[in-house]
Image: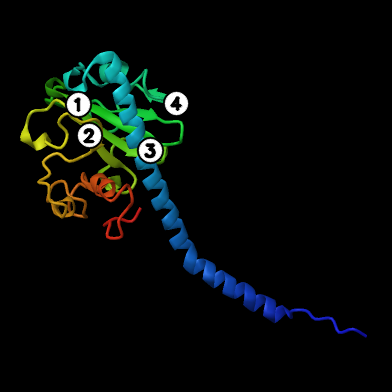
Amino acid sequence: MKKILAFTLAEVLITLGIIGVVAALTMPSLIQNHRRQVVETGLKKFYSTINQAIKMAEIDNGDKIYWTASDTDDFFNKYLKNYLSYLKYENKRVGTSNDWRLVYLPDGSAFLFDLYGTWDEDGNQTSKTNGGHFIFCPSAKDCVNGKDYDLWGRKQFIFAFWPNETSTSFNYHKGRGVEPYLQAWDGDEESLYTASNYGCNSNAKNFYCTAIIQHNGWKIPKNYPHRL
């Protein structure tokens, strides 16, 4: 009679238990690494896509430093609508600001943008620029409720477009397309983390987080201060 070799029930249960422990230890790391890759890929693609649209718009509308628009809708219709592949444009106010718009992209991401201005208590516009903010969300669902400071640097990433502003605080945006937000940056890499108002840290509003990733070749550095 040939002896049949087989695992006992106890051995099978022990093996399954070991597999379960290993999976429990490694899955969070794998999920986090996947999230980082999604953010890195999305940021790099958005940066390329939106600036290609800007360059194409310049062919028909002239140098971007001379662009003017009356409001966010006017900007979209003139300079983005015909040059950008998108699924849906929500022509309504999103979030708490007076003039945010939401654009859904074909890859499942989205961005909010505004033509920046200020309003008085009666809703009258008191000032405006010819550029503004672009808030990119690698996952569109993170944009649908508008801008959210708690998500900045984590699920919402801030860019800006101010090619024709003259103040020295816009030095890193003058003559450029849509770039990671760097208004008032002093040029010191460390201040991208430590700046009291705009730095990428738990005590500031995380405006500069996108720039940190760009400066690292669109890779999230090991010392990045936020968990994605």
Residue 223 appears left or right of 2: left
- Which of the 4 image quarters holds residue 174? top left
Asked whether residue 214 appears in the rendered view, the answer is yes
Q: Nearer the viewer, residue 204 or 68?
A: 68
The residue indicated by pointer 3 is: 45
The residue tagged with tag 1: helix, strand or loop?
strand
Residue on which the image places disc 2? 160
Q: Horizontally, is 52 left or right of 23 in the view?
A: left
Is the N terminus in the top left, top right, bottom left or bottom right quadrant? bottom right
> Furthest-right residue in view?
1
Q: Residue at x 25, y 48 (%)?
A: 215
Is 159 drawn above or below residue 223 in the view shown?
A: above
| Above or below, comparing residue 130 to residue 12 in the picture | above
Q: Earlier in the sequence, mark 3 or mark 2?
A: 3
> Disc number at residue 87?
4
* Residue shown at the point (24%, 49%) measured from the top left: 212
Q: Amino acid at mark 1?
A: Gly
In the picture of the structure, the residue carrying the numbered disc 1 is 131
Q: What residue lies at 32% left-to-right and 21% top-to-bottom?
A: 56
Q: Secondary structure at mark 3?
A: helix
Query: Can you tell which mark lies on residue 112?
Result: none
Judged from the image, the secondary structure of the residue bearing numbered disc 4 is loop
Badge 3 amino acid: Lys
